[in-house]
Image (cartoon, rainbow, N blue to C red):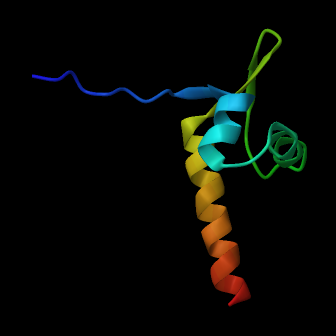
């Protein structure tokens, strides 16, 4: 039996960028623009998995409104 694959709860910026298909600079812009939530632990900026999901919902909503 294969163990279940666990997904990260928090992503470092490069990992979040890879998940979103964006560059690190763009992820930092989204954070500064309050479009993508993040937290810090010490000097490390982390993006919660829930924040990535919320950002995707925001993009879908904006696309629907634009159509």
In the rendered image, residue 25, in percent from the top left (x then y), is placed at: 88, 40
Residue placed most toward the observer, 48 or 15: 15
Q: Give the answer, above or below, for where 46 lies relative to 22.
A: above
Residue at image x 56%, y 50%?
53
Position of residue 5 measured from the top left corner of the image (x, y, whole percent): 32, 28
Q: Is residue 63 above or below residue 19?
A: below
Q: Residue at x 64, y 48 (%)?
A: 20
Q: Residue at x 73, y 34 (%)?
A: 38
Q: Residue at x 59, y 62 (%)?
A: 57
Q: Quadrant of residue 58?
A: bottom right
Instruction: Check the image and name the residue furthest to the top.
Output: 42
Identify the image quadrant of the N terminus.
top left
Q: Position of residue 63 (x, y in %)?
A: 67, 78
Give percent across and percent down for residue 19. Answer: 60, 42
Task: State left or right for residue 8 relative to residue 33.
Answer: left
59 shown above or below 67: above
Numbered disc total: 0
Q: Closer to the camera, 39 or 20? A: 20
Asked whether, in this view, residue 21 is left or right of residue 33, the answer is left
User: Residue 23's image quarter?
Assistant: top right
Name the outermost residue toward the bottom.
Answer: 67
Quarter of the figure with the C terminus: bottom right
């Amino acid at each position: 039996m294969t163990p279940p694959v666990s997904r990260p709860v928090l992503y470092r910026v490069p990992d979040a960028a890879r998940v979103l298909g964006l560059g690190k600079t763009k992820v930092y812009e989204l954070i500064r623009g309050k479009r993508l939530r993040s937290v810090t632990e010490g000097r490390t900026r982390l993006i919660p998995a829930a924040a990535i999901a919320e950002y995707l919902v925001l993009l879908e909503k904006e696309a629907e409104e634009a159509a």
